[in-house]
Image (cartoon, rainbow, N blue to C red):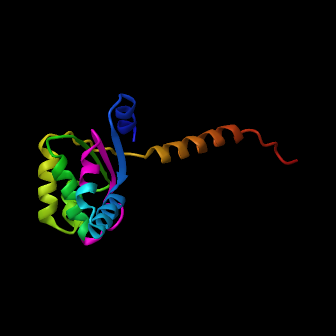
Amino acid sequence: MGLVRAAAQAGYRTYFTTAADLAARCHRAAIEGRWATTMRFYAGPTLLAIDELGYLALPAEAAAAIFQVVSQRYLKTSIVLTSNRGVGAWGEILGDTTVAAAMLDRLLHRSVVLNLDGDSYRLRAHHAANDTLRRTTTGTRQPLT
């Protein structure tokens, strides 16, 4: 994520994770009695990036864990959250419309929402490589005689 890289290069403490990894770490911390330590860890960075919310199915306790992280960072530090789904589908993604509404209330209060549409950078690179290959091979064949 370019935004996280720019923040890190500007000297801000950043941490990048996926929603699934955050939920798994929080679940493991709860089982091992390290919940408070894990919450302090996620509260620490100036910018926390949570990637891929909605890409994978999350277990039931994931919504509560992600909400706890968002809630403790609310009005204190920044969060970048990426999703392939619109905010209207977050109740379905998190499996709990009440938690989704409370999380969105905190996230949207002082936020900038960017809706990116179009090819990802991976697809753009793939298309560019194909176009280059097509241009370099077109016209180089000799006709069969």
Q: Is residue 19 above or below residue 79?
A: below
Q: How many labels does the image show?
A: 0
Residue at 65% across / 42% down in the picture?
133
Q: Return the x and y of residue 31 as percentages of the image width and height.
A: 29, 70
In the displayed structure, does residue 71 sit left or right of residue 37? left
Q: Return the x and y of residue 108 as percentages of the image width and height.
A: 15, 46
Q: Return the x and y of residue 45 as percentages of the image width and height.
A: 29, 42
Observer-nearest of 39 and 73 = 39
Observer-nearest of 65 and 109 = 65
Residue projecting furthest to the top = 10
Based on the displayed image, in which of its 4 quarters is residue 77 positioned?
Answer: top left
Read off the magenta span. 39-60
Residue at 36% across / 59% down in the picture?
21
Based on the displayed image, in which of its 4 quarters is residue 65 positioned?
Answer: bottom left
Q: Is residue 85 above or below residue 33?
A: above
Observer-nearest of 99 and 33 = 33
Q: Return the x and y of residue 29 as percentages of the image width and height.
A: 30, 64
Does the magenta run of residues contain 91? no
In the displayed structure, does residue 125 sit left or right of residue 76? right
In the displayed structure, does residue 8 sit left or right of residue 101? right
Does the magenta run of residues contain 49? yes
Residue at 11% across / 51% down in the picture?
105
Residue at 12% across / 58% down in the picture?
101
